[in-house]
Amino acid sequence: MMPLWFAELAIERTFMTRVVQQTVTRAISQKRQQIAALREQLEDLEDYLDLVEARVRDEGKPHLTQAEIKKRYGLK
């Protein structure tokens, strides 16, 4: 038969294992959310960089206004 103190230790160890597992699972979930948010920010920054590069590349070239484009393509 197992001594009582050993049984209490085994129960406590199991409880602590569950607590640690829940803590780790929660931390992993939070980190995944942070990574997703960082990926979105990175995509936004890459889009902005593309826009700035296009503006620099097209600097000095003639541009059409929205009205000119509508007239050219027969849009309303």
Image (cartoon, helix red, strand yellow):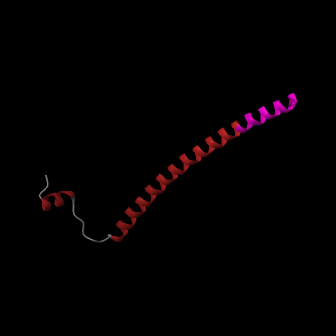
In-front residue for pair 63/17: 17
User: Is residue 2 located in the magenta-colored stretch of the structure?
Assistant: yes
Q: Quick check: 11 left or right of 70?
A: right
Q: Quick check: 9 left or right of 72?
A: right
Quadrant location of the N terminus in the rendered image? top right
- Image position of 8 with respect to 39: above or below: above
Q: Which residues are magenta?
A: 1-17
Quadrant housing residue 61: bottom left
In-front residue for pair 63/40: 40
Residue 76: image location, x then y, percent: 13, 52
Q: Quick check: 16 left or right of 32?
A: right
- Image position of 43 with respect to 6: above or below: below
What residue sits 17% from the left and 57% below the top? 67
What residue sits 65% from the left and 38% below the top? 22
* Majority SS type along the magenta span: helix
What residue sits 70% from the left and 40% below the top? 20
Quadrant housing residue 4: top right
In-front residue for pair 14/52: 14
Q: Residue furthest left?
A: 74
* Number of numbered callouts drawn: 0
